[in-house]
Structure formats: C-alpha cells, structure tokens
Image (cartoon, coloured by chain):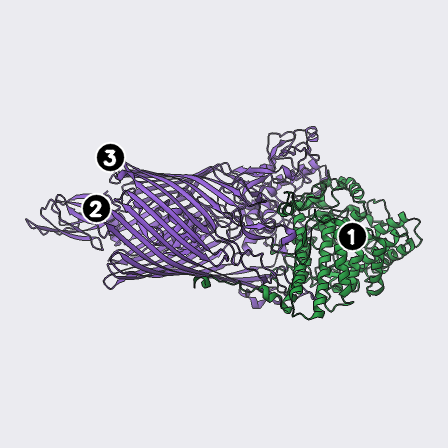
Chain colours: A purple, B green
Amino acid sequence: YAHVNNDIINAEYSAYQQTVSGTITDNLGEPLPGASIMEKGTTNGTTTDFDGNFSIDVSDENAVLVISYIGFNTQEVSLNGEANISVTLLENAAALSEVVVTGYTSERKSDLTGAVAIVDMGGVVSQPVASVDNMLQGQISGVNVVSSASPGGPSSLRIRGYSTIRNNDPLYVIDGVPTTSGINLINPNDIESLQVLKDASSSSIYGSRAANGVVIITTKKGKSDETKVSINMHSGIQNTTNLPNNLSAENYGNVYWQGFANDGITPAHAIYGNGATPVIPDFLDAENTIPSANTDWVGEIFDPAIIQSYNLSLAKGGEKSHSMFSLGYFDQEGTLKYTDFSRITARLNSDYKLFNDVVTIGENLTVAYSKSVGTSTNSLLGNAVYDAFRIPSIAPVYDINGEFTGYPLSDTQNPLGNLYRNKDNIENRVRVFGNVFTEIQLFEDLKFKTNFGLNYTTSDRTSFSPTYKEPNPQRVINSLSVRNNKQFDWVWSNTLNYTKTFADKHNFSALVGIESIENLYEVTTASIDDLPTNELNIRILNAGDQGTQTNSGDKIEYSLFSYFGKLNYTYDNKYLFSATLRRDGTSKLLNNRWGTFPALSAGWKISEENFFNNEGVISNLKLRAGWGVTGNQDIPAYQTLSGYSSNPYYSNYAIDGAQNSTQTGFTLSRIANPDLKWETTTQTNIGLDFGFLNDALTFSADYFYKNTEDLLLFKTLAPDQAGFSNSGQWQNVGEMENKGFEFTADYQSDRAKDFNFNIGVNFSVIDNELLSLGEGINFIETDPGVLNNVNFDQSTSRTAVGQPIASFYGHVVEGIFASDAEAASSNQSSAVAGDYRFKDINNDNVIDDRDRTFIGSPHADFTYGINFTANYKALDLTLFFQGSQGNDIYDLSRYYTDFFNLANYNKNDRILNAWTPQNTNTDLARVSLNDPNNNIRPSSYYVQDGSFLRLKTFQLGYTLPENVAEKIKASRIRVYLEAYNLFTITGYEGLDPEIGLQNYDSDDRNLDIGVDRGIYPSSQTFTLGLNFNF
Amino acid sequence: CSDEFLEKEPFGELTDDQVELPENIESLVISAYSILNGQGNEASNAFNSPASNWSFGDVLSDDAYKGGGGTGDQNQIHRMEIYNIDGQIIDVVQKWSVLYEGVYRANTVLKALKNTTEFDEATKTQRVAEMRFLRGHFYFELKKLYNRISYTDEDGNYLSNTQITPEEIWTKIEDDFNAAIAVLPETQADPGRPTKYAAWAYLSKTYLYQGEWQLASDAADEVISKGGYSLTPNFSEIFIPENDNGAEVVFAIQYSINDGSPSNYNGSIGDRLMPPGGPRYAAYGFLRPSQNLVNAYKTDVEGMPIIGNDDVTETDNVDPRLDVTIGRPGIPYKDLEINYEESWARDLATYGPYGPKKRVISANHPAYLQSWPYVTAANYSIIRYADVLLWKAEAEIELENLEEGRTYINMIRERAKTGSYIQNLEGTANAANYLIDTYDDPFASKEEATIALRTERRLEMAHEGHRFFDLVRWGIAADVINTYLAKEQIARGFLTGATFVAGKHEYMPIPQSQIDAGGKDESGNALTTQNPGY
C-alpha cells in the first residue's frame, strides 16, 4: 500500500523547473540508502543518500518518478505538483536480490548455488522462548530442532539428519566468530539475519566443523543518520496442557488388590490394610501425622507461569560510521514450579570508515548475564515430572504440620518438595562474545580483512541439599556444592578478497584466508556437608564440616589452524560457478592432523537465457548442483595421546586402612589412538528454484545425498583386554548415510492491495541409515553407566548397521494369551492368561533375548511447516503450523506407570484397562506384582506413534494509525496478541510429542532419541506484544 | 609454526616416561588396589559389579532375594534370580569388565616395574608380589563366576577362553599366589596390603575350589599355625568398623568415606543398595534374606541345627547368629534402640518382612554415610579367619579326618555360643530363644560330617557373597536351589517358573560384548566362545 504523503509540502512553485525532494523508506520506516530515482521518460536521475533522502530537479510539475531499489518492487509516483514526497517501497516477494552472508563473504541470493535457507527473523522473534535455535523449529526444510521446553533450556539443531553418531550440533558463526554453545545467551532481537548453510558446497568453506551444517548469524547495525529507537516487548502467561491422569487413591488400592488376586497373594498392605478390599485409612503413618489424600500430583507441580521480554535498541548510521546499542531483558518462569530463566543482554555494534573509506574498523560486542533455576527431566532419578507420575495419590502434599511429606512405602520424593528445595540453586552465567575487525581496501578490487573474535563464558552454580524427612526419602545431613567453569575461546582470521568484473559479463570473486582458533575449558568444584542450618545465608563452603569437604577440577584445551580459499565466477548472470578449498589442522589429532575439504558447485539461471520467455508465467528458473566434503573432529581432546591421571571416583585407595582418607592413585586416562583422522562427510545437492507470476509464487526443491565415512566412534573393545575404566577407544569406524528431499513453496499475493497474504510451506523427508560400524561390530547402545541413572537399566534403543540411528529395540508383543491353556501351549513357560505373547523372532521355540528386534524408529517419515500471514489494512495475522509424521516414541515412563512390578508407585489410568477375563480387548497385560512372564520387559508395548500437527504460532497484530503514533513521536506502533502452541493434534498420550534429548552434552546423546521418561512439556502460551519505532 | 600451535598436552596427567619414576609407580599400585571395590567409572552403579558379590553369591543362592521396589527394580538382577540369564545382563557384563580392569591395572604395574631402573630393589620385589596377589584375586573371581575365562600376562600375551582351559587358569592363579607367598612379609604396615599369610589363605582357597584337599589343608595350616589370626570374641562384632583390620581379617578391601572424593565412591559403593529402610536408613531394601535362610538358623533343644527347614516361630530355639545376620521384626536393630519392624521392608508383599543386617552398620556410627550414596567405611573381608578354619575343616573331612574337621567346626560354633547375644530393647533378656552348642560327639560318618560342615558354612558365612559358589563347587547347586525354589515360590510368587539348569547355571554366561569384540581366529571363528547352555 504505497502512498504519497501529502502532509509535508514545500510548495514553492517554479514554472519550468522544480526541485523535488523526499525520503525513500521501507515498510518499517527504515531509510533506503542508494535507491534509484529516475524521471520517467528521461535520463534524469539520482540516488538517495545514506538517510534515504534525495533531491531531483524535474522538468514538469506532473512528472512521474520511477523509484527502484534492489530487493524491492519498483514504484512509479506521479508528482501532481508536489515538491516533497516520501515513498515507502515494498519488498520484492522473493527477495532474490537479497544479499546473504555465506562463508567469510556475502553474495546475492540469486547467485547462490548451494542449499542456503534464509530465516525471516521478523516472523520468529516474537516466539515466547529464550533462544534463537528454539525459534527455528519447523521454519526450515531439512532442519529439525530437538529441544527441552524448560525455561532457557538447551536445544540441538539437526541439519539434514544425523551425519554422525556423536555430536550432530551445527557450527554457529556469529559475526564471523564460530561457536558451538551458549546460543541462549544471544538475544534473538539483536539478530539482523540468520542463514543456514545446509549443503557441503555452501558450508565447506568452514570445513573443519561444518559437517553438521552452519548457522550464520549477523547482528544488527545502524543505518540512518537519525537515531532510530525501537522498543519491542511482550509478556504473557504459559500453561501446561494435556496432563496425564493417574490413579486416584481409591483406584490404586483397587488395582493393587486386583494384582494380589491375580498372583494368588493374600492381600497385605501397610496402608490399605489386609482385608478383602483395600481400605483408605485416615492416616498413612502410626503417628497420625500424614493424613490420607487424593492428590493430583502432576497438577501440583505445574502452574501457569509468566513470561516477559523487553528490548530497547538505539541505532544510528551515516556514511562514515554506524552504531547500534541494545538492551534486552527476558524472564521466563517455568510452568514446572520453582524453575526459571532470566537474561539481561547488552550489545554495542559499531564501525567507522577512515582515510577516505579505505579503512573500516569495527566491533560487535555483546555481554550477557543469565540466571536460572533448572531441574533435571527426562530421567529416572531426580525428575520431578516422573516422580509426580509415580507417587501414589493417597499421599498428601503436606503433613499435619504443614511440612512436605510423601508416601511412606516408596523412595519417591515429594516432587513439589523436591522442586521447592531446589529453588535457590541458581546457576549464573556471564558471556562476553564479540569481535573486532579491520577492513582495508588495498586496491580498487582487493580488500584485506582481519577479524579477531572471542568468547568468554563463565558459569557458577551453587547447589544446596537441605535436610528433610518426608517420611521415607530423607536427608539427615545437608550438603552444599559449588561448581565454577570457564570457557575461553578466541579466533583470529585474516582474509583477502578480490572482486572484478571483466567485459560486463565475467564476474570474478576470490577469497583466501587463514584462521587460528584456540579453546580452553576449565572447571572447579567443591562441596561440604553438615552446615548448621538450611537457611539461605549460611550457604558458603566455610560453614560446613571440614572433614567432609571435597574438591575436584579439570582443564582442557584444543586448537585449530586453517587455510582456505574460495573462487566464484559468474558469466553473463546466467552461469554460476563456485569452488572452495579448506585445509584444517587440529590439536585433537596427531598422525593425521590435517584434513582437506574441497567443494564445487554450479548454477544455471535458465530464465536468463534468451530462449526463455520472460513475459510468460515462469519468471525465474534456476538449476543448482553442488558437491563438497566437510569434516568433523569433535571428539574429546587428547584422544591421540597416552597418559595417566588420577580420578577421585575410581583410582584412590585407603591402603593404610584409614576410614576418612585415601592415597592418590593414577590410572590410564584413555586408550590412545595416535592414528585417528578426520571424519569426513561428502554431500551432493541438486536443487531447482522456480518463480511464477513475477516471483509471487516460488518453489524450491532440493535433493541431497550425504555420506559420512571414518565415523569417529568410541568403539567398545573386548573387556578382557581393555578393562572397564577405559572400555573402548576412539576410532574411525563406520559409515553413515543420509538422503533426503526438501521442498519449499511460497506465495505472496499483491502487497499493494489492502488485503494481502503470504503462504509458505516447507516439507522434508530425511532417510538415515548406519551403513557400517567397522568389522565385527553390528550395533552400539547407550553406555550402561548412563542407563542406570536415567533408564532403570532398560536398554530401549540400538544404533545398528542397516538401521537408522537410535532405533527402538525389544520384543514384539503379538497379543495377550486368552486362556491359561493357550499360554501353557506356548513357548513361555511361566505365562498365564492375560500375559503377553512375545514373538519368537528366531523360531527356536524359546522366548529369550535373541527374540528382540527393531520395533520402531524415532525418525519421522516426513516433517513439515506451514506459515500463513495476512494483512488487511492495519491488521496482520500469522499462523504457523508445524508437524511431524510417522515418528515413534518409546514411552519409557510406562515402565513404572503401567505395570505393577513396581507396586509402590502410582499408575496411569490406562491400567484400569488392563487385561482381565472380562476385559480382553486391550493392549495392556494383566496386573501382576510377580509378573512371572516379565511382561514389563522392553517391548513394542512401549512404542507409540509420535506423529503430531501443532499450531505453533497464532498471532494477530494491529498497527495503530500514524496520527496516533505521532502523538508520542513514534513512527510506528504495533500491538499484537500471540498464542503459542494453541493446539496439538496427536495420538500420543504423554505430556508432549516433541521429546527432547536426555542430555545435551553427553557423547551418547543421540543413541536414545525419542525416549520419554517424563519430559518438561512445551507450554501453551498467550502473550501480548508491543512494538514501538521512533 | 602452525604445528606447534596444534601441540596441546593434557593437563594433570603423567606421561608414559613419568610413570616409570618410583613415586609414580606407587600411585599406579594404589589404583590397582582401588579397583578391588568394583568401582571403575564415574557412574554410581557399582552395585552391578559388587566386590561383595551380594547379587551373584547371595541372591542367586537360597540365602536371599534381590529385594528393592519390586521385580521391575533392577529387573536384570530379578532375571538372574529367576535364572533367566543371558550375556547382555549388565551385571554379567560389568562384573566381568571390572575384574579384567583389575587384571589390567595389576599387569600395568608389573610391566612398569619391569621397565624401571630407578626403583629400589627391595620395594620393587614387594610391589611385584602384591600385584601378583591382586592379579591372582581378580582371576580367581573371574574363574569362580565365569569358569571359561581368558588370560593376559604383564607382557600382553593373551589367551582367549578357547586358547586356555579352566584347569590351566587354576595353575596360573596358583603361580601368582605362590609368587606372592615367596616374597610378601608376615606383617604389613599398611593393612591394605596382603601378607604372606593372606597369600597362603588364598592359595588354600584355590586348592579347595579344585578339590585338592591335602594341598588346601596344608596351605590352611600355614595360615592357622603361623598367621597369628584369631576369631573375634563376639560374632556380632566381626563386622563393626572398629574391627576393620582386626585379628580375624585375613584380607579386606579398605573402605573410606568423607575423604574428599566427590561422591564417596571409596566407601562400600557396591553395597550401596543394602540400607534396609526404617527410620534411620535409606530405603533401598535390596539383598533380602530368604525365609529358607531364616529357617536354617532354627536349632533343636540341644542347640544343634535342624535340617528340615520349617518356618521359625517365636518360641523356637534359634542360633544367635540369626539376629546378627538378619533383620527380623521385633528384634532390636544394632545399637539404634529400636526394633526392626516389618514396615522397614520395602515391597513387603513381594519380598517378605526380613532385612539385611550383618554387613549393615549402625546408623549411629560415623563410618556410616548418612547422605547419598549411603555407603560405609566398614571394610569388606575377602577372606576372614573363620572362612579359613572352615576350609581347613572341609579339607580334613574330605580327607576322612573327621575329628580334625569337627575340631575346626566347633571353633566356629564355640565363638557363636560364648559371644554375647542380642538383647531385647529393655536389655533384660535375650531378644529371642537363642540356643547353640558345639558338636560334642564324633561324626558318625563322612556324610554326617559333610552336612555339618556345609550347614556351618551357611550359618557362619551367610550374606558375605559365598553361598552360591560353595553350592557350585560342592556340586549340589541344582539340587539345593531347585528344592529351595519349589518351596519358596509358594510364599514368594516371583520365583514361580524359575529353574536352575544343571550344567548351565553354575557359571555366568560370557558377556555378549566380549564375544562380539573379542576377535576372530584365522579361520574366522570367534576367539571367545559362550559357556555351555547359554
């Protein structure tokens, strides 16, 4: 809705020549410097200055001005005698001329030959989450975000599947500084643009760490001569939906008695009595302090919670300098009580042109502070969500004295008490992140740039475990532990960039560079027990019993050094070629320290050919193809070096018989492998871009094939040779394959109309398969030490040759025996009617561990996102749907909630539908305490369909009339209402079908994806937002 | 210059060269002792590889149930308990791996000692002997649990379980103990290091397991006549922390708590699931005494064991060791001035009312860690003197020297008889009808003597991780356990369907991961093969 603003008129009139002046801005009111203004039908023209202002002498008072700017629709304006006009240009729908930052340089989007996704930050930044990576879920084809919904919680991007077994996280490059962690300390509001380099031809320039894709983030800088102020804020309320129903106090007793009956046990229960039917007593204990109740434990631990975000930015630019200053505050209380994340960020970006613009010096710096109280979820131990599933409803939250209490017969802590006791265990983090750079125009076509970036992150966490008694779980001695860690990374890169156009048709650009990176991590911990009180003020290490003090620490360092080059050539804007080569050395490797990573790509803009009819329906057609190799060296440091270290967990010993001291022992640190080499991923990408109807409708389709060789894998060695403390060795074994298809479509209706809309669709299919694990090894599983704490020792998943990573593995439930006779004639000697019939996979007439097989996959058949935005006059609407189809979830929470083997824990209401002779149409075996058939074993019963479709974002906005805005000197005021996760359509019965990882740092993190052990569920959030521009 | 930039050495580690310095070899020695407790990583699951063998030695026998929160709690140990065992059970895998870690660490020291030139010769010889003792222990444990095991010496020579026979393994173990005997001193300043007599005792055990009765008896004689050991006067005081390295201890794992280590893993970490519940203990409630074991303590009017295994009633006479070994409702528990109650028992309906007691120490004692992981600093005796006396008795009975056997059995019974008995809460009387006496008449037959000996071993050594291995070496495991299962499952339904298969369940399966990763011979056959029946 371009318009000519008649309000500001300077009406001095001259008959034959008139000077017309004005301002050209974009739809956000940002000035457009360098826009072209031509008097129609003449060669008279000018361009806007840095503030979007222009002045032109026209020959006719009714002249028509043609205003154009790269990336925007060209507009014609009739002067009709006006001497001063302001024009708002509208962005070109496809924005093909948009400049995107790729590796160390930038290029026009229309010239891209690789698979690069560009995220419209404006469309995602209002989401009520802390971290930009969380905002990307569903937005980009081929990119999946696995995240914890806890406040400020971690997340992990998966770009085009799983190229390796261990760390699949992408490399983030923020203003030229690579980083892999702490993305939640970057304020999303500071981000100008975000690109994802998905294929090897685009990412290979970052060779060393690009195998999982690269996310390039560029932060904002000032543009206008005037100081532009913008304020963005939103706040709202989050709520947890879809809570499970657990057995009431009465039903729990009834099902318990059903179990006694099924097992032929005379009922005897310390709380429900010894009678023919269970009896709910008045009190659960002999002292009459714990009254019986009917507590909805899951309801108790969740509460609606506030989320708020406030951002202020001041930006100013000019021909010689730009600066941008911002402040942000974000606070997300958790819906899980007593959890919280808050963050303050400040950013200062500036640059200065010196010596006739030959030298540019600049910096981008952000300082962030966050404070959080977290809790572990998706785990057996210490998980309040899971504890709320497990603690029987008959237990009250508080005893008669108002203290937290619990169930006398089980070890489950009162989950609310657990959260409460954790509420002051705050983790503080400070991150200083930024870069300084100097760019020198050596010659007309040759630029030198040096860039030094650093990341300094410290975090400290004080954990206090107070004494409590409730009544069975208890702590009689309080304990305080403190953990400090520090990460210091720096990167220094130097590049030479040459750009030249010959004969108007040959565009060359070349880049060469070197880069060094050093990374240091240090951690110190200490603890002490037996502090005199549980009060907050006493919680320092000096206050405890000195005899119980402990300390430990570690320090790790690694470095990278790289050479790289890139060559781009475009002929006649039709044929595009690009080649990159990078050579990296890493301190993590020894005998094969250096890796070489080449990439080639080409594009053909078919629509630029003469034979192509540009006036037709198809306005743009481009074919892209790329091939490249990327590397991965992300293993723990020092794996090529042998050494001996002390480990207070397993190398010390009280040889002198002392009961409170040990001698320090040293034991082998690792089984070194000096021959380790780079893991390499070779990726081929073919893409086709279509534009129709002057690019109002665009399609893009990509097919990729990725093959990872020399997989870096911690390979378990024969224990009789390797022992236990070092159970294996890092080796280059195995091969992984990912292939997939990505499709995006976008339609933009005519923006000049009062009603206009945009619809964007993305769709991805990714097929992952582990091709090999080296000779003799067919599968790997999660480390047993991990299984114990998080999985009740249940092995749910197997990463096996010929299967996708982390496929579910177990017995197949074929049905339920209808009669004892049927059970007796089976291969399951202990089974009776109501027990599971397990499939005899190997047909040996025995049901044992050999009858386990692959029973499901956590990977989706396809994932998709649908983005719909519409504008009508001052109103705007955004709908964003996200979905996943065909993925399974291993609902391990059913281990406790669906079987009575663990009798003193509450059950899900599902168990009311357990098999009985009268209720045979069910998939849940009979209730049994003894479970001689071991119905509880890992099986297909636990595997559930995890498909879902979610309305992730619903946003309705209203831009106030300009005359209202002007009253407070604002150029624009917009108010919006957003509903996040408004509804989810799924058959999954758990809290949330989007299952995050168990642990975002573990080496094993990808070996048990899609396993639900009681997760922190996504919230349904309603926010009210305000945007002010001054 | 870039390569120099890429040279990063680990912090806080000794290099291969530094390790061969004498003071650093001593720290390798410490780490070899350290793995005795079964804790080899940073996970808190050493209960899968407990040094005390409570799961393998007690739960698999007729002495105990797994316990815990139900059959789904540590379900893999439940599967072991009902003899549904395979080579992927984490306990089977982890125990194997931890024991080979012990072998590995001992061999590492032995190899370093071979290479070093700076070590003083006398100490070096001592350390070699200590490491051979430890290696002997680790191989003994492996042999006893898995039978067909592999062997690696300090030079890295490796023989898989298809390349060395179980009999040859015995010889290797004997060699280690003999080498230790030749060098080790009669006493050690550090009680954690084995003495000459600890090595003699272990050699006696090695012979005993092979049925080499005369050699076993002779070796036991060395311990009895020269070792200077004696029985602790009160049976109930053998297991208190004050007697950690007392006169009865031949070789013990040295536990320590509150010693500055981050999670107190230097305590009795493999036994951390043993606290029985109740007002003063964490309610893990594992290792639950079987009804059958309780019944075994019933005595007749003369204080002699009754073989029939009828349920004990309140008025029955019982061996006083019963209430030291087992938590029984209505009997005072330790010095806590409260009775053990049925309500302490976690999952009473499944696992019955009894709780472990013998190796649980008083919650009042500073050697009990009252916070997670609830471990103790009370040592676990790998060999105590009473054990040696019973080996001696057994060897003599097998050699038809029945009277000699009776003498040693009576030494054990005499101590149980003359020591102090558990008193009721008021301290006014014995807590139960304790009655025990010695065998005053010569055994009528070798058979009778054998029954007496085997009964005595069960009563004296219960819940110390030995019972299952005794049943196996006596060749009666299938009989005893199947008889036990048939009766016990009436009250304890989770045992329904469990059967001990003779010729299979005497030994654990070889871990599947060992077979998979253990390599192949030239003709492509796996170098490590599975035990019979699995």
Mark 3 belongs to chain: A
Relative to residue B148, is residue A631 drawn left or right? left
**Which of the labelled discs sits on residue B45, or is there none?**
none
The residue carrying pointer 3 sits among few (fewer than 14), some (14 to 19) or many (20 or more) residues within 10 Å by Cα, namely few
Mark 1 belongs to chain: B
Q: Mark 2 points at which residue?
A: A68
Mark 2 belongs to chain: A
Q: Name the residue under label 1.
A: B462
- The location of residue A137, given as percent across then percent down, is 42, 45
Of the numbered discs 3 and 2, the one sitting upstream in the chain is 2
Q: Mark 3 points at which residue?
A: A613
Q: Is residue B337 something that shows in the picture?
A: yes
* Position of A124 relative to B236 (above/below): above
Q: Is label 3 on the same chain as label 2?
A: yes
- Give, as a three-letter code, the residue at label 1: Ala
**For the view shown, which residue lies furthest in the front direction?**
B522
